[in-house]
Image (tube, rainbow, N blue to C red):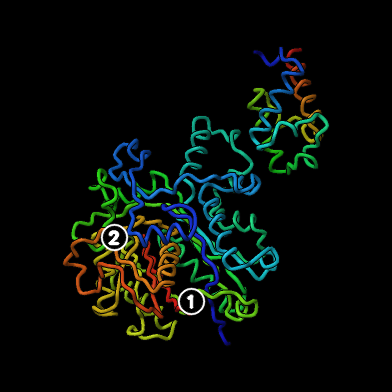
């Protein structure tokens, strides 16, 4: 499956699985509105690894994207991945 | 300045016998061998030593992810041992965060598996993009001590005195001095070790590892024995709680023993060859620190790893200082050489035996080597009242360390 053909649902699924595996979360915690820091308990070191995990899962470069710093919730993550995919497709 | 008395109020262990001081004590008391074949070692070309003392599988998820992310296996072992020691000592969050409790803890070298992982990703294209945020936190020389301190919310001083096989003996000694001087009331002291084939190779390459018992692992190592052929590496972690006597008494703690003497020194003659004169001097200085005569020591737990020259040098030094009556044994024949953890684990095993006035003999010692005669290498467990015992540790690089304990 090419990254540029993924649906939002597929992005959500891949993101949730990757995050749960990396940070040892139960899938029930993975709601779109979940705040990465206050709800999921991630911190500054985890944020670095979150970027690494997403880059590996989606084969995209996120680290130097300015929008990364604005990400707060899982929905923000899904949207950012989708936006990057659309940019790539275009 | 009046130095403070320092006592032992807690012990914790992870050893090739499993989790806990009780497992260590049962293994030593039962004269069981913890040595097995190390399958990973047999896959390494030109590595001749293929046996080791390995920690059984442990559920690492007992350590929360956020604590575990800056640890390799040795940190997890150390944290588990620390928790056992703290529980035994009856110490809690208030003590840990008081600023009066510190950590003196180290390992032999950085985790080999982590180095493999890092350089496997780095070397092909000189690329660090694969590195996690915590890679360096695990690679730091003080990573073991700092990660355990972070996990336990320790606010006191951190000492990370890496000195290979003398590490935990030095760590205990430096913790002792911090309390003596009144800088800390409590110190969590010890060492931890996880094995990588590189550990075995480091001894094998200098012809100091056992290579003749790959098909009969439980028969090695053989401290002081005529057929000894070298070190058998092992992994483990041990922690002692050292505490000022006044602090321990004030809170009604159970006192397991008193640390009354410490010495550590360098032998610059050679980085690998044991130096009987330096060993002798180290033990003499530890006795001097304790204010004791050699005749007052009741037992000596030797470093004796099962190398030809190391055991002979230690035996010579013991013979010169203590004569032929002092009971001497080594626990390397039981569980191998737990390297950075050896000093503390063997101290814990000695204390465990002394709770029932029992001294355990050297496993795999069947025929005393002519170079090791003239000291009391007893062959069966002794029932004996012990007041003072001495623990030796020596390391590559010419490091010597000795501790003198008193039972209370």
Q: In this view, does B392 lie above or below A6?
A: below
Residue placed most toward the observer, B155 or B221: B221
Q: Quadrant of residue A57?
A: top right
- Count the marks: how many? 2
Extreme residue toward the left, this view:
B370
As drawn, the label of residue B259 is 1
CA distance separating discs 1 and 2: 27 Å
Q: Is residue B89 above or below residue B297?
A: above
Q: Is residue B215 left or right of residue B91?
A: left
Residue placed most toward the observer, B222 or B208: B222
Q: Is residue B158 above or below residue B291?
A: above
Query: Mark 2 sits on what residue?
Result: B363
Chain identifier of the residue bearing label 1 in the image: B
* Callout 1 touching callout 2 (CB < 8 Å): no
Chain identifier of the residue bearing label 2 in the image: B
Q: Position of residue B194 (x, y in %)?
A: 46, 49
Q: Position of residue B82 (x, y in %)?
A: 56, 60
As drawn, the label of residue A12 is none
The structure residue drawn at horizontal position 42% and vertical position 53%, both measured from the top left corner, is B17
Residue placed most toward the observer, B368 or A83: B368
Residues packed near mark 1 inside 10 Å, few (<14), some (14 to 19) or many (20 plus): many
Q: Position of residue B382 (x, y in %)?
A: 31, 72
């Amino acid at each position: 499956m090419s990254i540029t053909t993924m649906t939002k649902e597929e992005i959500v699924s891949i993101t949730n699985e990757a995050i749960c595996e990396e940070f040892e979360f139960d899938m029930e915690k993975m709601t779109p509105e979940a705040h990465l820091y206050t709800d999921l308990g991630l911190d500054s070191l985890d944020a670095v690894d979150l970027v690494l995990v997403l880059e590996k899962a989606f084969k995209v470069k996120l680290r130097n994207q300015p929008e990364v710093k604005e990400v707060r919730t899982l929905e923000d993550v899904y949207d950012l991945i989708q936006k990057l995919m659309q940019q790539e497709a275009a | 300045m009046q130095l403070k008395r320092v006592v032992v109020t807690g012990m914790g262990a992870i050893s090739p016998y499993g989790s806990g001081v009780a497992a260590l004590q049962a293994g030593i008391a039962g004269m069981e061998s913890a040595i097995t074949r190390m399958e990973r070692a047999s896959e390494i070309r030109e590595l001749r030593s293929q046996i080791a003392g390995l920690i059984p599988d442990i559920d690492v998820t007992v350590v929360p992810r956020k604590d575990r992310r800056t640890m390799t296996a040795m940190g997890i072992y150390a944290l588990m041992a620390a928790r056992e020691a703290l529980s035994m000592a009856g110490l809690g969050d208030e003590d840990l965060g008081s600023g009066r409790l510190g950590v003196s803890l180290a390992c032999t070298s950085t985790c080999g598996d982590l180095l493999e992982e890092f350089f496997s990703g780095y070397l092909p294209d000189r690329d660090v993009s694969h590195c996690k945020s915590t890679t360096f936190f695990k690679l730091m020389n003080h990573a073991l001590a700092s990660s355990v301190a972070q996990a336990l919310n320790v606010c006191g001083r951190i000492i990370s005195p890496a000195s290979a096989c003398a590490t935990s003996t030095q760590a205990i000694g430096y913790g002792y001095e911090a309390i003596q001087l009144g800088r800390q009331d409590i110190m969590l002291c010890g060492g931890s070790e996880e094995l990588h084939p590189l550990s075995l190779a480091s001894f094998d390459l200098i012809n100091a590892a056992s290579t003749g018992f790959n098909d009969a692992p439980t028969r090695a190592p053989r401290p002081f024995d005529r057929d000894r052929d070298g070190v058998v590496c092992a992994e483990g972690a041990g922690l002692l709680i050292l505490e000022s006597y006044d602090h321990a008494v004030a809170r009604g703690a159970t006192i397991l023993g008193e640390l009354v003497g410490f010495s550590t020194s360098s032998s610059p003659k050679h980085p690998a060859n044991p130096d009987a004169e330096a060993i002798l001097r180290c033990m003499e200085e530890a006795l001097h620190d304790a204010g004791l005569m050699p005749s007052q020591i009741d037992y000596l737990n030797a470093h004796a790893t099962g190398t030809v020259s190391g055991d002979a040098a230690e035996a010579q030094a013991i013979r010169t200082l203590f004569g032929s009556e002092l009971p001497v044994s080594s626990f390397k024949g039981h569980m191998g050489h737990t390297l950075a953890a050896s000093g503390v684990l063997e101290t814990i095993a000695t204390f465990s035996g002394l709770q029932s006035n029992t001294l355990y003999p050297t496993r795999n010692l069947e025929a005393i080597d002519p170079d090791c005669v003239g000291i009391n290498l007893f062959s069966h467990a002794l029932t004996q009242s012990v007041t003072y015992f001495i623990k030796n540790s020596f390391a590559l690089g010419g490091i010597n360390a000795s501790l003198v304990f008193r039972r209370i």
